[in-house]
Image (spheres, coloured by chain):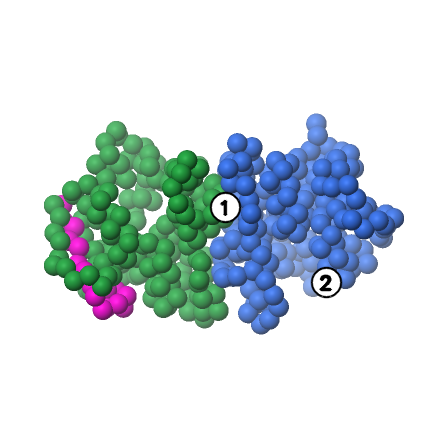
Chain colours: A green, B blue
Amino acid sequence: MAGKVFFSVSMSLDGFIAPGSLGELMGRQWMELQAWIFPTRFFRENLKLGGGGEEGQDNDIVRATYERTGASVMGKRMFDAGERMWPEEAPFHTPVFVVTHEKRDPWERPGGTTFHFVNDGIEAALDQARVAAGDRDVRIAGGGETILQYLNAGLIDECTIALSPVLFGSGVRLFDGVDASRVALEPIRSEPSPRATHLTYAVRRR
Amino acid sequence: MAGKVFFSVSMSLDGFIAPGSLGELMGRQWMELQAWIFPTRFFRENLKLGGGGEEGQDNDIVRATYERTGASVMGKRMFDAGERMWPEEAPFHTPVFVVTHEKRDPWERPGGTTFHFVNDGIEAALDQARVAAGDRDVRIAGGGETILQYLNAGLIDECTIALSPVLFGSGVRLFDGVDASRVALEPIRSEPSPRATHLTYAVRRR
């Protein structure tokens, strides 16, 4: 059976997934947005951050998200930011398909991550990711604009949102520009942890 | 002990509490936003809608919100809309303080609701509501602009958001204009029901 196509992001209670600019307030907001994931053991080990980390519900959710993912798709902007920030052993350990106009040979990293640069659009990138993922799932990793393109194209089966107890007031909204006349949500589960509420929905076409 | 000041609203996953205009899509969105509350027995009885209604978790939450409320505060726009829509026996059964520039004598309705029109601002309206509520809580009933004024003024102790599985794409955002540098949230509880996730936060001043 083919896997699902999903995304999984942290969102502020007022709907933002990233600050709009840099600055002291924004730095604090970003830390609060990600406060549930930073301390988890799996996240810290996967990014080689060291320092042990916490077990428990949030850690289980990070691990499960990682383990279900057979391939990821991301936009060029996320790749560009990540290229500067990921450790040499990039944290995916699967094929990653980058939607971009840039022509570039596959970029193989230690630890099993290979970035493939796809020049013919979001559907082509997803098709390649599906094949690479086999019976595991394809994660649309980000950023927000790329997630929204897949959502509005009806290509997302499921999403998980870690709703964090923080207000941004401004920044990048996850659902800005969503085609609300076409996208329906069906609750699958809602898992409260002390630091976030993990909301999972099936995404349906109206 | 004095009661708390709280608000309780239904919000779409993308942060809206009301449609921006009328129309078929908006009517559907509104119904989906409120889909958790319309069928509940308490809501239907309180608005004299008839038809029995459902018991269970959502019903318990509606009832508990009603029972904790010793007085409500609302803006003029919400009052104007409600004046046309509430049954003769308005659904509050407590004093309600309307923040308005209009001078008007108290308006007593059958069933224990009396509307008081307060002309000297949100703090004065809240002071009067606190006295009227005694040891029960004061609900800032709405609309969104009024809730935001109280939130930014640091006058809210707690909020409950029924997060509904619907996307609006446009409309009235609950937190549009929130002073994110001053308002902090602390999770109290997160209660998933089949039709919504009920999120309760303590609101703190930074």
SS type, badge 1? loop
Magenta residues, as a range?
A111-126
Give the residue at x 56% y 32%.
B205
Residue at the image position 21 percent from the left and 36 percent from the top: A48
Image quarter in which the N terminus of chain B is found: top right
On the question of residue A1 being in view, the answer is: no
Residue type at mark 1?
Gly
Could you say where residue A105 lies in the image, as x and y percent from the top left?
12, 59
Closer to us: B46 or B53? B46
Q: Secondary structure at mark 2?
A: loop
The reply to whether the magenta stretch includes residue A192 is no
Q: State the residue position of label 1.
A: A169
Foreground label between 2 and 1:
1
Q: Nearer the viewer, residue A21 or A5?
A: A21
Q: Position of residue A64 (x, y in %)?
A: 29, 47
Q: Position of residue A58 (x, y in %)?
A: 36, 40
Residues packed near mark 1 inside 10 Å, few (<14), some (14 to 19) or many (20 plus): many
Q: CA distance from mark 2 to mark 1?
A: 41 Å
Residue A49, which numbered label?
Answer: none
Image location of residue A86, percent across then percent down = 22, 43
Q: Amino acid at mark 2?
A: Gly
Q: Would you name the residue on which mark 2 appears?
A: B50
